């Protein structure tokens, strides 16, 4: 039973470390001037505004064009949510990692 508990804790610790790593990558990207210009300003702001404006443009009212614009808007939204989620999960995993490392240490101490 102790081996199973320890194995589960080790897996959880590794999962937390991976989540922290990915969250840190997002933070690094956000501070990168190229990423900021291309993705944050260019894609999330400028391209998003362009696509939303095209939704009302008389030249883009066919069903196929509106469907394409809806998909473009959804793509921007999904990508932004992906980055936010990785960052939030990384922050949450930092606390989780400390708790699981404490639990692992307690199990080790009990079995000495």
Image: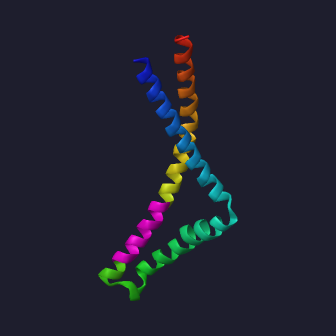
Residue sitting at x 47%, y 66%:
76
Residue at the outermost left position: 63
Query: Residue 57 in magenta?
Result: no
Q: How is the image coloured?
A: rainbow
Residue sitting at x 57%, y 74%:
46
Query: Residue 71 in magenta?
Result: yes
* Location of the C terminus (image quadrant): top right
Q: Position of residue 47 (x, y in %)?
A: 53, 74
Q: Position of residue 61 (x, y in %)?
A: 35, 84
Residue sitting at x 57%, y 23%:
102
13 over 58 or under it: above or below: above
For the stretch drawn in magenta, what is the main secondary structure? helix
Which of the pair 27/107 is nearer the observer?
107
Q: Position of residue 100 (x, y in %)?
A: 53, 27
Q: Position of residue 6 (x, y in %)?
A: 47, 24
- Picture quarter containing residue 57? bottom left
* Location of the N terminus (image quadrant): top left
Circle count: 0
58 over 68 or under it: above or below: below
105 over 87 or under it: above or below: above
- Picture quarter containing residue 43? bottom right
State which region is magenta: 67-79
Residue sitting at x 59%, y 72%:
42
Horizontal arrangement in the rendering, residue 65 relative to residue 28 (left or right): left
Residue at the outermost bottom position: 59
Which of the pair 18/89 is nearer the observer?
18
């Amino acid at each position: 039973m102790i081996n199973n508990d320890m194995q589960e804790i080790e897996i959880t610790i590794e999962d937390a470390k991976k989540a922290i790593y990915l969250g840190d990558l997002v933070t690094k990207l956000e501070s990168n001037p190229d990423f900021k210009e291309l993705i944050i300003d260019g894609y999330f702001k400028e391209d998003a505004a362009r696509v939303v404006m095209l939704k009302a443009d008389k030249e883009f009212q066919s069903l196929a064009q509106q469907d394409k614009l809806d998909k473009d808007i959804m793509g921007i939204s999904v990508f932004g949510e992906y980055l936010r989620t990785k960052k939030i999960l990384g922050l949450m995993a930092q606390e989780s990692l400390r708790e699981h490392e404490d639990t692992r240490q307690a199990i080790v101490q009990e079995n000495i």
